[in-house]
Image (cartoon, rainbow, N blue to C red):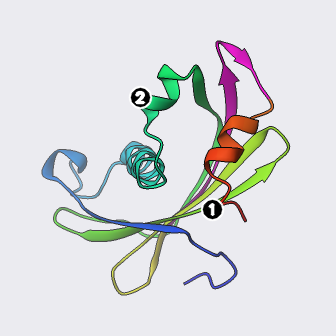
Amino acid sequence: MDTAVKYIFELPIKVRDYEVDAEGIVNNANYLHYFEHTRHEFCEQAGLTFREMHERGLDPVVRCITVRYIRPLGLGSSMVSKLALKRRGPVFEFIQDIYTPEGDAVAKAVVEIASFRNGRVSRGDELAEAFKDYLN
């Protein structure tokens, strides 16, 4: 495991049958769903769901995703999706890594999020306040 990253949230996930391709491995696009699901669950645990953010006029939007695939998962595989959070000015950087339950790296991603307030790009201060206890 990557000991340099200080993870603040973990989510166990199991591969479902519709997520594998003809070769019996998870299609690479499904990792984007795993990462997104993990971010949504983290936000809910942190006390602010995406619905609540939107109702407040806050909309975090993916600006860039970089994924490095390391090893495949197959049907019925289990994984642990881990998340760390940093802020660089107006950009929130989610470090999102997926491991096997045994600790072997599966995929590593960096997801950059821009913050919008009432439809306009913002500095993200509202999100920073909401996530202040979790920012590295």
How far apart are the alpha carbons under marks 2 and 1?
20 Å
- Residue 86: name its quadrant: bottom right
User: Is 21 positioned to the left or the right of 93 in the image?
Assistant: left
The reply to whether the magenta stretch includes residue 74 is no
Tell me which label, 2 or 1, sits earlier in the chain. 2
- Residue 120: name its quadrant: top right
The reply to whether the magenta stretch includes residue 116 is yes
Query: Circle 2 — which element?
Result: helix
**Residue where numbered disc 2 is placed:** 51
The residue at 69%/60% (across/down) is 135
The residue at 58%/19% (across/down) is 57
> Residue 52 versus residue 100: which sits nearer the camera?
52
Q: What residue span does the magenta drawing correspond to?
A: 107-122
The residue at 75%/21% (across/down) is 121
- Location of the C terminus by quadrant is bottom right
Residue 21 shows up from this direction? no
Residue 116 in the image: x percent, y percent? 67, 23
Tell me the crowding category of disc 2: few under 14, some 14 to 19, or many 20 or more residues within 10 angstroms, Cα based: few
Amino acid, disc 1: Tyr
Decide: is 14 above or below 5: above
